[in-house]
Amino acid sequence: MTQSSKPKTKKAQLIQMLNRKAGADVATISEKLGWQSHTTRAALTGLRKAGFEISAEKQGQGDPLSYRITAQPADAA
């Protein structure tokens, strides 16, 4: 059985999106995972509580915040 490149759980998909060099903004995450924006922000908080370090950066004036994982807990690797 071959393993697909797309993660199966939404949490795994979220982590994959946040591991990209550019990260992802709340609107993009919400659209991709079918979540409302408050659910997306709660999931980011949950990752932080689980030991992930997540940075929020503004790419340019008027652009939304882009979230990116900068460090993961050792057991998440």
Image (cartoon, rainbow, N blue to C red):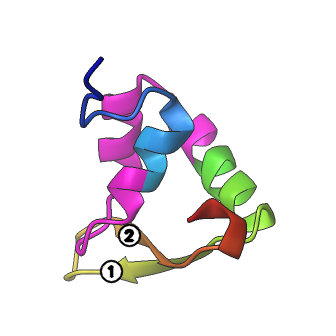
In the displayed orientation, state which residue is furthest to the right. Answer: 49
Q: Quadrant of residue 57?
A: bottom left
**Whole-percent x, y for residue 43 in the image:** 64, 46
Task: Determine the main secondary structure of the stretch shown in magenta.
Answer: helix
Q: Which mark is residue 58?
A: 1
User: Position of 57 compared to 59: left or right?
Assistant: right
Quick one: SS at disc 2? strand
Q: Which quarter of the rendering shows the C terminus?
A: bottom right
**Residue 34 part of the magenta-drawn span:** yes
**Residue 19 part of the magenta-drawn span:** yes
Quick one: SS at disc 1? strand
Q: Amino acid at mark 2?
A: Leu
Residue 65, placed above or below residue 34:
below
User: Position of 76 compared to 20: left or right?
Assistant: right
User: Position of 26 compared to 45: left or right?
Assistant: left
Residue at the image position 47 percent from the left and 53 percent from the top: 15
Front in this rendered view, residue 72 or 60: 72
Residue at the image position 38 percent from the left and 35 percent from the top: 7
Magenta-drawn segment: 16-40
Residue at the image position 42 percent from the left and 71 percent from the top: 68
Q: Quadrant of residue 34?
A: top left
